[in-house]
Every structure is written in C-alpha cells, then in structure tokens.
C-alpha cells in the first residue's frame, strides 16, 4: 500500500509521473482517488494504459469521477492537454455527502458551478444522444435548488446530498456528450494561469451562455425552465441571465481580474483557444475575434 498526497490544481504532469512511479514501485493494482477533480485527474493518470482499477470517492462537485476525460498540465509550456480514455472510468464510485460537510463555501460554489456547466453544455452539445439532455436538466434542477442552501448552511446534509446527486448527473451528462466552447476556453485559461478550474467555470459560464444563446434557443429555454428563470416567455436569454444572477449571489470571484488573471494574456489565450478542438465543437461558430471579445468582457 502507498499514499500519494502531492495533488495540485490542473494536474501537473510531474504529479502524475510521480504517482505512477510510486504505483509501479509498490506494484499497486487498485488506486483509490479521494478528493476533488484534481485528485481524480491524478488517479486517472495512474491507471491510464496500465490495467489498474480506479475507485473514486469525490469530496467536491467537480464530477470527474463520472467522465472518461482527464487532463494534465505542462507547466513549462503553460498548456493543459485534455484527452478521453474509457479505461480511466472508475470501476466504483462512492458518494458520501458527509465528506462534503466541511467543504468551504468558496469551494462548494466553484465546484458546483463546474457541475452546472457540465449540465448546460450537455444540453446543447453537437450530436448529443437524446437521452442525455433530460438527465442534464434534472442535474440543473438539483444544483440550482441545493447550492444556495449549502452556502447558507454547509452542514445541511439533505442539501449536500441533493447537490452531490446533481453533480453525479452532471458528470454523467458531460461524460456522454461533446464538450464545447465553455470547457475549451476554461482549459486554456487554466493551463495559462493556474487559476482553479471551478473558479474559471464560474466566471466564464454566463458569458459563454450569452454568446451561444441565439444559436440554441430551444436548449436555452429548457435550461431556463429547469432553473425557473422565466422560460415561460420563450426568452432564450433568460438562462444566461439566471446563471449570472446565481453567480452574483455566491462567494466567488466574479471577473477574471478578481481571480488574478492579467489582462495582458487575454489575446494569447484567445489565439490558443481558437485552435482548440473542444472550442471548435461549439454549436455556434467561434472566431478569434469572438474569443477576444468574450475574454475581455469577462475580465
């Protein structure tokens, strides 16, 4: 048995290499990942291509335990590389809301909005299986109703369980859909800046939704209805407004500048994101100019 605790945000490649070396040295066959999305990422990196079994015990709402996706960051190049590998899906996931009771309001909010972003992108993903959006919409309902309760009282076990269920539905949804502009731009920003993925999700999500709204009006109306954000008028802009209002109520940075992202790198981020395969999967075409405008608006 061995323990690896050198987990860091955005899963530096060196951390995965060190964990894999430890697993090889001690002839580890079963890996247990306990923690948030970064812990899951290290665990996936250890089992990828090695025939090992992964067991996941999530302590946040990132949802990585339900997806075949994992990324590692090359710190020298300041670039995050994301890949899919069905072999990294955990063989067992243990959800226990009691392990989330001490999660700070800030981490609760940021990782829950990450889960919300999974649901939202799954609702309008290209060529999505028609069975996925209903699951994603149920995830939205649970996240939106339980997140404020968890922020008000972090030891509300019922709300924590509801939010964890929403995160599970979110992870399942994005694991069976194609990621698009939102996740692509957050991956590039994370690799460049090191800002936590959940924080970047929280800042960027309303802006990306506003950009996409006119291209996917039916999905946006369904999202707004799930959020109870005024969809009865068939106003497809109600969904991004609803998410923006939710984010405004949370203890998280509201703008990229508040998270420590320097304005000077925004054009560089836009250029890299324009060539990102995930960004190109967006249901609405995205130009370099669109990305620059989007990032400067969020800054």
Image (spheres, rainbow, N blue to C red):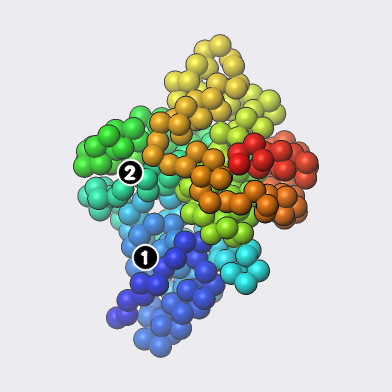
Query: Along the horizontal axis of the image, is 77 left or right of 122?
Result: right
Q: What element carries label 1?
A: strand
What is the x, y in percent for residue 121?
57, 39
Q: Which residue is at the front of the view, 220 or 30?
A: 220
Quadrant containing the C terminus is top right
Q: Residue at x 58, y 69 (%)?
A: 75
What is the x, y in percent for residue 210?
62, 30
Q: Name the residue under label 2.
A: 105
Q: Residue at x 43, y 74 (%)?
A: 52
Residue sticking out furthest to the top:
233
Q: Residue at x 39, y 57 (%)?
A: 36
Quadrant containing the N terminus is bottom left
Q: What element carries label 2?
A: helix
Q: Residue at x 36, y 75 (%)?
A: 4
Question: Can you say whether 123 is above or below 186 in the image?
Answer: above
Number of the front mark, 1 or 2: 2
How crowded pointer 2 is (Cα within 10 Å; few <14, some 14-19, many 20+) is rated as some
Query: Along the horizontal axis of the image, is 79 left or right of 61?
Result: right
Q: Name the residue under label 1.
A: 33
User: Which numbered disc, 1 or 2, marks the residue that appears first in the sequence?
Assistant: 1
Q: Which residue is at the front of the view, 248 or 175?
A: 248
CA gap, disc 1 and disc 2: 23 Å
Displayed quadrant of residue 72: bottom right
Question: Can you say whether 178 is above or below 223 in the image?
Answer: below
Residue sticking out furthest to the bottom:
25
């Amino acid at each position: 048995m061995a323990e690896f605790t050198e987990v860091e945000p955005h899963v530096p490649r060196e951390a995965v290499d060190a964990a894999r070396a430890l697993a090889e040295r001690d002839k580890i066959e079963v890996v247990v990942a306990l923690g948030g999305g970064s812990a899951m990422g290290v665990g996936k990196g250890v089992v990828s291509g090695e025939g090992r079994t992964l067991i996941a015990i999530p302590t946040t709402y990132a949802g990585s335990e339900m997806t075949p996706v994992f990324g590692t960051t090359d710190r020298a190049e300041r670039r995050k590389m994301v890949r899919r590998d069905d072999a990294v899906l955990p063989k067992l996931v243990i959800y226990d809301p009691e392990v989330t009771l001490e999660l700070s309001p800030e981490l609760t909010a940021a990782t829950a909005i990450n889960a919300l972003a999974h649901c939202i992108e799954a609702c309008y993903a290209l060529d999505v299986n028609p069975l996925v959006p209903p699951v994603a919409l149920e995830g939205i309902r649970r996240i939106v109703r339980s997140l404020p309760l968890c922020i008000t009282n972090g030891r509300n076990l019922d709300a924590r369980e509801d939010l964890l269920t929403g995160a599970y539905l979110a992870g399942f949804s994005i694991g069976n859909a194609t990621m698009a502009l939102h996740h692509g731009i957050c991956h590039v920003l994370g690799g460049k800046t090191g800002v936590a993925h959940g924080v970047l999700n929280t800042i960027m999500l309303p802006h990306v939704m506003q950009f996409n709204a006119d291209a996917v009006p039916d999905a946006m109306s369904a999202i707004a209805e799930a959020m109870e954000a005024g969809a009865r008028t068939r106003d497809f802009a109600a969904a991004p407004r609803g998410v923006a209002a939710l984010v405004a109520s949370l203890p998280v940075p509201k703008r990229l500048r508040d998270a420590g992202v320097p304005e000077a790198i925004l054009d560089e981020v836009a250029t890299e994101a324009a060539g990102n395969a995930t960004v190109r999967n967006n249901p609405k075409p995205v130009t370099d100019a669109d990305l620059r405008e989007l990032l400067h608006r969020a800054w």
